[in-house]
């Protein structure tokens, strides 16, 4: 019989994964409604403002935890890169959602696997493949291997942020455990 991890971080991770899966049928409708009610540019501005506010709140937390103010920037370098790619290079808003969703999942998994980045990335990719398999079965969604790649990129961003978060204990790959 499969025994699931019972630590609080695993509960948060499993709950968040369920939220990703359960939102699949409704996300396109939500984005379409935002576009119709606010407009495309206004929706992008709203999402950028929410992302910016969340990032600023996280940076303030990192600033408090860092021994030196400049160390608080390390977790946010890939987030800034992703924001640039996501808001400039990605036309489809659903791809932007994938990036953000899986960055959060990657950070949760990095903590849940006690700092084992390879396990965190492997689990995130498996969840991403499951995400796409569910989309294949839904009438208003479709399978796209590029989304799996976007999920993996998002997870890497979250893993990077979690690894470089100030005040965290160092864990080596040799001590990976679930």
Image (cartoon, grey):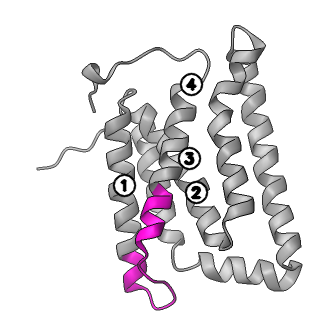
Q: Are marks 2 and 3 in contact (CB under 8 Å)?
A: no
Q: Earlier in the sequence, mark 1 or mark 2?
A: 2
- Which image quarter holds the C terminus? top left
Q: Are marks 4 and 1 in contact (CB under 8 Å)?
A: no
Q: Say few, some or many: other residues with alpha carbon within 10 Å of mark 1 (under 14 / 14 to 19 / 20 or more).
A: many
Residue highlighted by disc 2: 99
Q: CA distance from mark 3 to mark 1?
A: 13 Å
Q: Position of residue 170 (x, y in %)?
A: 44, 15
Q: Earlier in the sequence, mark 4 or mark 2?
A: 2
Which of these two is toward me, 32 or 1?
32
Q: Position of residue 43 (x, y in %)?
A: 82, 70
Q: CA distance from mark 1 to mark 2?
A: 13 Å
The quarter of the picture where residue 86 lies is bottom right
Is residue 134 placed above or below 96 in the rendered structure?
below
Q: Earlier in the sequence, mark 2 or mark 3?
A: 2
Note whether residue 7 is visible.
no
Residue highlighted by disc 4: 164
> Disc 3 vs disc 1: which is toward the camera?
1
Name the secondary structure under disc 3. Answer: helix
What's the mark number on residue 104?
3
Residue highlighted by disc 1: 125
């Amino acid at each position: 019989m499969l025994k699931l991890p019972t630590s609080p971080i695993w509960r948060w991770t499993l709950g968040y994964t369920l939220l990703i899966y359960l939102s699949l049928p409704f996300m396109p409708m939500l984005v379409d409604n935002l576009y119709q009610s606010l407009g495309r540019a206004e929706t992008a501005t709203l999402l950028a403002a929410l992302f910016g506010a969340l990032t600023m709140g996280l940076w303030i937390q990192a600033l408090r935890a860092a021994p030196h103010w400049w160390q608080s920037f390390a977790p946010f370098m890939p987030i800034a890169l992703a924001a640039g790619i996501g808001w400039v290079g990605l036309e489809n808003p659903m791809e932007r959602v994938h990036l953000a969703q899986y960055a959060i999942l990657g950070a949760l998994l990095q903590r849940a696997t006690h700092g084992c980045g390879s396990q965190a990335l492997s689990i995130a990719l498996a969840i991403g493949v499951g995400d796409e398999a569910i989309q294949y079965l839904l009438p208003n969604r479709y399978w796209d291997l590029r989304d799996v790649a976007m999920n993996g990129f998002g997870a890497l961003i979250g893993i990077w942020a979690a690894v470089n978060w100030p005040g965290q204990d160092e864990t080596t790959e040799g001590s990976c455990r679930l």
